[in-house]
Image (cartoon, helix red, strand yellow):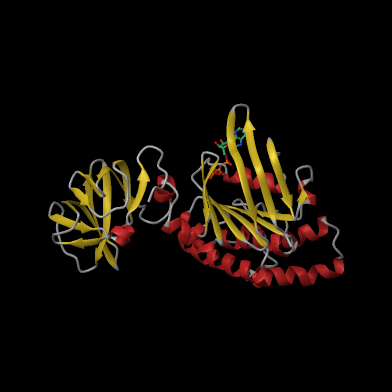
Amino acid sequence: MAEIQLRGVSKRWGSFVGVDNFDLTIADREFLVLLGPSGCGKTTTMRMIAGLEDPTDGEITIDGRVINDLEPKDRDVAMVFQSYALYPNLNVYENIRFPLRVRGTDPSTHDEKVRRASAMVELDEFLHRKPAELSGGQRQRVALARAIVREPNVFLMDEPLSNLDAKLRVSTRAQIKNLSHELSVTTIYVTHDQIEAMTLADRVVVMEKGIVQQVGSPTEIYDRPANTFVASFIGSPAMNLIEGSCAGGTFSTQNTEIAGLDVADGPVTLGFRAEDAEVRGEGGQITAPIYTLELLGDATMVSVRIGGALVSAKADKSFRAEIGDMVSIHVPKEHCHLFDAESGERIG
Ligand code: ATP
């Protein structure tokens, strides 16, 4: 069992607020991802849970017990860093065994535990090698095995894939997902990569400037982003956001008129995803010259400029046109997201 609670947790350095009033209960066995751009406070939040940083305010509990004053080593959490932090002079076997030795675990159990952990991350063949003789992906798997071997109550992972190349990142990501299913241990995972967040998480916490913007399942934050920050951070490409105004349920701005919306009159930001729009020859609600065309293989991305914003829509792969040709984009009204023009908060 390991349910983690953060109650009003803040971290300040002088007048600078790194994490602002973080409130969340992380369920036993949940895979929670902290997602946000560089400097948003993800790592600081994780370091406070690990005990490497003291909160300025608030309480952190594991299974109801306040752990604020507990030493990191007494928290029963295992951390995996992006930098691996392996011992260069120890081979893979000894690196994985290291936490068992430090903790004084019964030596007669070591061999079985090390072999089980290394098999889980498919390192059985490399046990005699030194870290310098391994690839980046293999090193990261040693770091994972070293966390697994401790059989902790909580895994904390800080950008564990960020030093891997794109291909290795995908395969190691799949391995982490599979491991987390197998081990079923409460996991908090930090990343700035929304695809990692969407593929791994049971729930995602989107943060910006130390403040939690939204907490939800990957589907919830994708389908109903709480504000324009989340809307523009989740999804690839990012959600199109157009400034305009509504009158009588019709949103309009340059080259754009979308009727039938349920929203009060006034300035609004309208959002829609490229994959939810249709590209037509004519008769859509946005009609403008093509700014750019990108062939994606399975589809063609068509972009136009509306005001200052680049607005994209996914067309069929057979779509043929030239830059500068007029194109018409249709956005079904059920796929329109409406945000307050000033605060950016969702209003419909
Ligand atoms: P990244 O993805 O770049 O690691 P992050 O979201 O993990 O970013 P944090 O490392 O949590 O961000 O940092 C949050 C903010 O707190 C940053 O603006 C950072 O500069 C600041 N910060 C972190 N540690 C300290 C410190 N010891 N003293 C002062 N400011 C700090």
- State whether residue 191 is above or below residue 254: below
- Image coordinates of residue 270 in percent, x first then y, are 31, 48
- Image coordinates of residue 331 in percent, x first then y, are 26, 58
- State whether residue 217 is above or below residue 58: below
- Image coordinates of residue 251 in percent, x first then y, are 25, 48
Where is the N terminus found, in terms of image quarters?
bottom right
Say how many tags the image has: 0
The image quadrant of residue 211 is top right
Instruction: Name the residue located 72 percent from the left edge and 72 percent from the top edge.
Output: 116
Q: Nearer the viewer, residue 274 or 175?
A: 274
- 321 vs 1, left or right, is left
Q: Nearer the viewer, residue 59 or 313?
A: 59
Q: Decide if residue 133 is in sight here.
A: yes
Instruction: Name the residue located 64 percent from the left edge and 48 percent from the top edge.
Output: 46
- Image coordinates of residue 14 in percent, x first then y, are 63, 27
Q: Nearer the viewer, residue 208 or 196?
A: 208
- 230 vs 324, left or right, is right
The image quadrant of residue 140 is bottom right
Q: Nearer the viewer, residue 178 or 211?
A: 211
Instruction: Name the residue located 60 percent from the left edge and 63 percent from the top edge.
Output: 138
- 287 vs 236, left or right, is left
Whereabouts is ligand 1, in terms of quadrant? top right
- 314 vs 328, left or right, is right
Instruction: Name the residue located 71 percent from the left edge and 46 percent from the top edge.
Output: 60
Q: Decide if residue 52 is in sight here.
A: no
- State whether residue 282 is above or below residue 66: below
The image quadrant of residue 202 is bottom right
